[in-house]
Image (cartoon, rainbow, N blue to C red):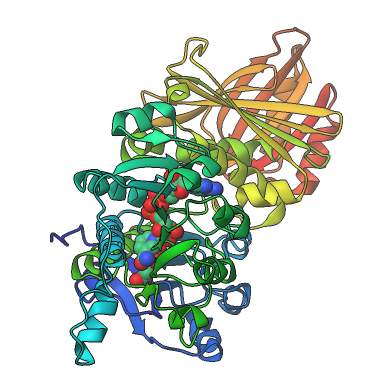
Amino acid sequence: MNTTIEKTTVKNAVILISDPLSEEGLQPLREAEGVELKIQTGMTPEELLHAVKDADALLVRSQTQVTREVIEAAGNLKIIGRAGVGVDNIDLEAATERGIIVVNAPDGNTNSAAEHTIAMMTALARNIPQAFLSLKEGKWDRKKFVGVELKEKTLGIVGLGRIGAEVARRAKGQRMSVIAYDPFLTGERAKEMGIAVGTLDEVVAAADFITVHTPLMKETRHLINADRFSKMKDGVRIINCARGGIIDEDALYDAIESGKVAGAALDVFETEPFVGHRLLDLPQVIATPHLGASTIEAQESVAIDVGRDVVRFFGGNPVRNPVNMPSVSREVLAKIGPFFDLAEDLGAFISHLADQPLTEVNIRYAGDLAEYDVRPLTRNALKGILKRNLGTHVNDVNAKFLADSIGIGVSEHKTTQSKGFQHLITVEVKAGDEAHSVSGTLLNGLGERIVKVDDYVVDVVPAGHLLLIKHKDQPGAIGRVGTLLAEENINIATMQVGRSAAGGDAIMMITVDNEVKPEEVSRLHKIEDIHAVRTIDL
Ligand SMILES: NC(=O)c1ccc[n+]([C@@H]2O[C@H](COP(=O)([O-])OP(=O)(O)OC[C@H]3O[C@@H](n4cnc5c(N)ncnc54)[C@H](O)[C@@H]3O)[C@@H](O)[C@H]2O)c1
Ligand SMILES: O=C(O)CC[C@@H](O)C(=O)O
């Protein structure tokens, strides 16, 4: 496996690894400069609370429970890496609130989990573990372990994502017919895969074998419960290599005891480690201790994937597999990446224009940008807007959460009509009875320019110390402002005047060499015909 990536400079990041990760997978982290790896596996919750205190990154598999308490104890934590798919062991809400990005490795273990599912289904159909145990006990019992074939049986798949789809492919190779339920599956995709689809009740009623492959969330907890078991065929067999909790274990126990369910193959459990549970006493149950992703290949792959994302993150580069912020493809990132700073600068700029608390933010994307998923740009614009009032802890992970929590409605609009610009971003805000807008573009795809502020057409670089002065559009105002700035020893670097489309008023956008103090702003206010003065420091 190729583990080569560009060397990245990470500034003294402490990376705590609290579950066993593949040594090869840690290579990207070992190769990165400025990283201190702390490998402390098998910690008690109390030990973890202590160990995480100075960690900048925390890397886990499924064992470590990254609770709100852990997140709150980790004052420096910036990124949590999950070497695997399921993030149900991480309090995503707490991480998002604190602006901690969570990344996972969504496809590194797909194949292993699918192979394990097929292995478990086959072992279940043919009683392989039970027969082996009996043989080890010195018995040669062939009658007791007569099984069933997979061929021509119906496999019901609940959750046709990465692993579900791989399982479907393999099951078809076993000449099973496959029926799936997934609320997010399009009919087109199912058709492409040659899979029948149905409602959950239809799928459980049609299947001889049922395998679940959804994430564990509140919507999927006990998705397979007593009511669902009652709708299944007699003698159905159940496989769970996804997450404990998707199947109600008590209901499964009763369904096996009653003879409704002929057997179950379980890799995952409501509480892990799963030892001494009554389900394990049932001869119809076979089980493995959460081994779905436990192959050399999968472990190498997931550790490399999260390791690389952590290196990318500390190198200031976009991560590939974010869980708690929008994830866009590399191709889209290449298109929208150059606009990240512009979006944030437009947000920061407009945050200076409103006096009252913001109630609404609308971000409009025009021209080429309208073709792409621009959610990361919206986050950046929000970050720019919120930073001024909420401080530096605002980042693109928590910007949307913070906006929601203080009651700011956020919307995103796209149009390919861009009024002569190849691409244009407009940030509009509403604050009480005030409404403001600012539009910006990248000239030749390079330099940032603000091209419109409210109703005024301008051409300003959004950087440094800016003075925005609204005044009556008549001779004298510009001269008076220039004179006052000279008296205050404030050097003007650039000056732009824009007229309101409606006429009557104009705007001066002045870039100055140093910050303009409040007393200087009040002097500017007093000048005749000046309506408004804003200082904007970007
Ligand atoms: N046993 C293991 O070691 C192991 C290894 C890898 C993954 N997993 C688990 O397997 C599961 C699937 O992983 P994946 O990589 O295929 O994820 P995925 O995100 O690719 O697929 C999950 C699918 O579930 C569907 N889904 C969501 N809610 C649903 C619902 N209410 N009903 C039906 N379908 C629903 C989604 O639309 C999606 O298609 C996860 O729970 C993951 O944690 C376990
Ligand atoms: O860490 C593991 O081995 C399990 C991972 C697996 O459950 C997952 O969700 O990716």
Give the side of residue 516 with respect to residue 308, left or right.
Answer: right
Give the side of residue 206 with respect to residue 382, left or right.
Answer: left
Name the quadrant of the C terminus: top right
Q: Is residue 302 visible?
A: yes
Give the side of residue 516 with respect to residue 527, left or right.
Answer: left
Q: Quadrant of residue 128?
A: bottom left
Position of 153 relative to 34 (above/below):
above
Q: Residue at x 40, y 48 (%)?
A: 157
x, y (%) of residue 378?
A: 56, 37
Position of 470 relative to 536 (above/below):
above
Q: Is residue 319 visible?
A: no
x, y (%) of residue 161?
A: 39, 46
x, y (%) of residue 155?
A: 36, 48
Name the quadrant of the N terminus: bottom left
Q: Residue at x 36, y 31 (%)?
A: 189
Position of 83 relative to 192 (above/below):
below
Q: Nearer the viewer, residue 487 or 387?
A: 387
Q: Residue at x 31, y 47 (%)?
A: 153
Q: Which image quadrant shows ligand 2?
A: bottom left
Q: Nearer the viewer, residue 468 or 184?
A: 184
Position of 496 relative to 522 (above/below):
above
Q: Nearer the viewer, residue 431 or 263?
A: 263
Give the side of residue 103 with respect to residue 468, left or right.
Answer: left
Q: Nearer the viewer, residue 22 or 348?
A: 22
Total marks shown come to: 0
Q: Residue at x 47, y 51 (%)?
A: 233
Question: Which residue is situated farthest in the left direction here?
Answer: 1
x, y (%) of residue 54?
A: 49, 81
